[in-house]
Amino acid sequence: MKWISDLLDIIFPRRCCVCGELLSSQEQDICLNCLYALPKVEPHVSAEIEKIFWGKIGIERAASFIYYHKGSPYNNIIHALKYKGRPWTGLLFAGMAAAELNEKGFFDGIDAIIPVPLSREKRRKRGYNQCDYIADGISQATGIPVLKDIVERNISNETQTDKSRDERWENVKGIFTLKRPELLEGKHILLVDDILTTGATLASCASAIQACCNCRTSIFTLGYTSQAV
Ligand SMILES: [Zn+2]
């Protein structure tokens, strides 16, 4: 009922997660101006993203949706999802990404989506895992099931911005454990994370999975920090 949503907009004004302007009743989480200028990762950049994992793990394909570069107002999308208690932002933008990638056949043959888990401590503090929402957004758009709680993160290692690429890789080795390897045997899985920078965390998670079962892995992240910029 439109009058109820109009009334709620007056009592609890909704704001664009990028620029902070008030949203109209037709806009969802992001205003149309910001939506039109969304800094999407171009399809040809997938080759650059896949290259990040060379020499670490075998992957089938990889894609990201938007750039996450220092100073960009669009980083607010990821901040809203991770730090500002707006996990539904992940659903919305992952759904948008999935609709576009689905047309290009990106999800063809993928059997299950696995969100990269947080450590128990981190999850308790945040109250949710943002990657679960990204995974759910893709699932709603594609019908591919999500397998949550199948991988466990043994320790938190999220603060490693002061480390070099090689140090980060060393720092995350062995932090993930696959609990139900039989569920993934022979499957093609899509591993999902919020931001891709050096790929160390994703590579570590994929490596833990691939060590326990014979499966193929593809990767999707919502944000991408290109090393080429
Ligand atoms: Zn806006």
Image (cartoon, rainbow, N blue to C red):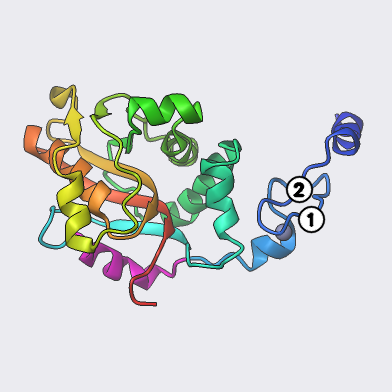
Per the rendered image, the range of residues in magenta is 41-53
The structure residue drawn at horizontal position 50% and vertical position 50%, both measured from the top left corner, is 99
Nearest the viewer among 187 and 75 is 75
Do residues under tags 2 and 1 come within 8 Å of each other at their CB atoms?
A: yes
- Which quadrant holds the C terminus? bottom left
Q: Residue 8, percent across and down?
A: 86, 32
**Vertical placement of 27 versus 179: above or below?**
below
Whether residue 86 is visible here, answered yes or no, is yes
Does 47 appear in magenta?
yes
Q: Is residue 122 left or right of residue 185?
A: right
Q: Is residue 174 left or right of residue 10?
A: left
The residue that disc 2 covers is: 15
Majority SS type along the magenta span: helix
State which quadrant residue 111 falls in.
Answer: top left
Amino acid type, callout 2: Arg
**Vertical placement of 70 versus 146: above or below?**
below
Q: Is mark 1 within 8 Å of ligand 1?
A: yes
Q: Residue 109, percent across and down?
A: 26, 44
Q: Residues within 10 Å of mark 1 (few under 14, many from 20)?
A: some
Q: CA distance from mark 2 to mark 1?
A: 5 Å
The structure residue drawn at horizontal position 18% and vertical position 23%, both measured from the top left corner, is 179
The structure residue drawn at horizontal position 85% and vertical position 29%, both measured from the top left corner, is 1
Nearest the viewer among 126 and 115 is 126
Q: Residues within 10 Å of mark 2 (few under 14, many from 20)?
A: some
Q: Earlier in the sequence, mark 2 or mark 1?
A: 2
Q: Outermost residue toward the front?
A: 162
Q: Secondary structure at mark 1?
A: loop
Q: Is residue 167 left or right of residue 67?
A: left
The residue that disc 1 covers is: 21
Q: Residue 15, percent across and down?
A: 76, 48
Nearest the viewer among 174 and 202 is 174
The structure residue drawn at horizontal position 15% and vertical position 44%, both measured from the top left corner, is 173
